[in-house]
Amino acid sequence: MADPMIADETCFAVPGGLQGIGEDSDFTSTPCCCNGYLPSVPTDDPSFLRETAALIVRDIPMSSSNTISIDTKRIYMAGHSNGCITALSMAILHSDMVAAVGCHSGAALTSFPDTYNPTPMMMIHGTADQDVNYNGTEWYLSTLSQHNLLATKNKCTSNKQLLNLNESPVNNYTEYTASSCENNATIVLLALDNVGHFPFPNLEGKGIPIEEGTDVTVIDTTQLAWDFMNKFSLDVPPVLEVSSEDEPVGDNTSSTSFSKDVSLLIRVLTSVMVASFSWA
């Protein structure tokens, strides 16, 4: 169970150090994500999230009497804002585990290790975002520059820009797609015109702050992210190890045959992690 005192005073933290390319070659991103809003607490949250995935993979079969198992070749990362930053960092640092990323209103900050294996990623971002600025800040590159950098890291050789115009202006968005990549690891950016930090539909009356002068999209961007991610799977299952002090949960005494083999989607919110499962 989470300690609310800790949750209120800390946040998911990931390393920075991502170097820009081309005209941004002198740029280096900073670590994330407290940046004066919350006290900086030394953490290793990417390793924590990997451990969490390992625990879920181990414990779900036991707690479900072996009726459900996790397809470890289909572990996905998603999130919003800080959670998106964390999801992208996980793909960079733990590309052996993350099959794909689909996240909203974040930024790529973490430098790529030599062990990085090109991973499919979709970023969804409002062009009027005032919290994680679409045009970048001194902490992170512009979102389009991030897209181009990720495409370079994935060795993509084809780039396409598609402007989607609809009857309602709040449906308009530009889709940037980098394809023909190593491992088929496509990179996609959906840039939603005049949408703010929350690029989700049906926000009215839900207490979510909407920046003045911005639009609420009517596009189901969560579904778009899921449709992107679930096309991908790893060629080789990752090695997921659980530390010895973590005791198994549930009973593993029943039949070892599984009736459901599900994918695992880890969504990281500002200071909350949610694990979801899909039969697809």
Image (cartoon, rainbow, N blue to C red):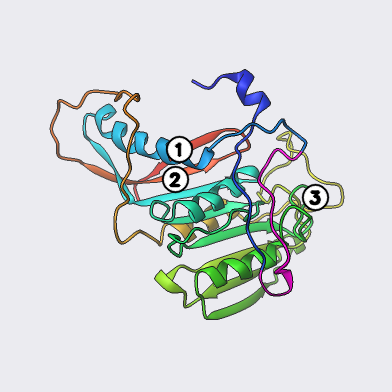
Of the image marks 2 and 3, the number of the one nearer the N terminus: 3
Q: Main secondary structure of the magenta part?
A: loop
Helix, strand or loop for disc 2: strand
Where are the magenta residues, as a range? 21-35
Residue 265's label in the rendered image is 2
Q: What x and y, as percent, mark residue 8?
A: 66, 24
Give the residue at mark 3: 130
The image quarter containing residue 108 is bottom right
Up-down: is 65 above or below 50? above
Residue 211's label in the rendered image is none
Helix, strand or loop for disc 1: strand
Q: What x and y, as percent, mark residue 88?
A: 55, 53
Q: Nearer the viewer, residue 84 or 242?
A: 242
Up-down: is 242 above or below 125? above
Near mark 3 (Cα within 10 A), the count class, few <14, some 14-19 or many ≥20, is some
Mark 1–mark 3 distance (CA, rounded to whole Å): 28 Å
Q: For the residues labelled 2 and 3, say whether their Cβ atoms are less than 8 Å apart.
A: no
Near mark 2 (Cα within 10 A), the count class, few <14, some 14-19 or many ≥20, is many
Callout 2 amino acid: Leu
In this image, 184 relative to 32: left or right?
left
Q: State the residue lying farthest toward the bottom.
A: 158
- Residue 25 lies in the magenta stretch: yes
Q: Residue at x 43, y 41 (%)?
A: 50
Residue 275's label in the rendered image is 1
Helix, strand or loop for disc 3: loop
Q: For the residues labelled 1 and 2, say whether their Cβ atoms are less than 8 Å apart.
A: yes
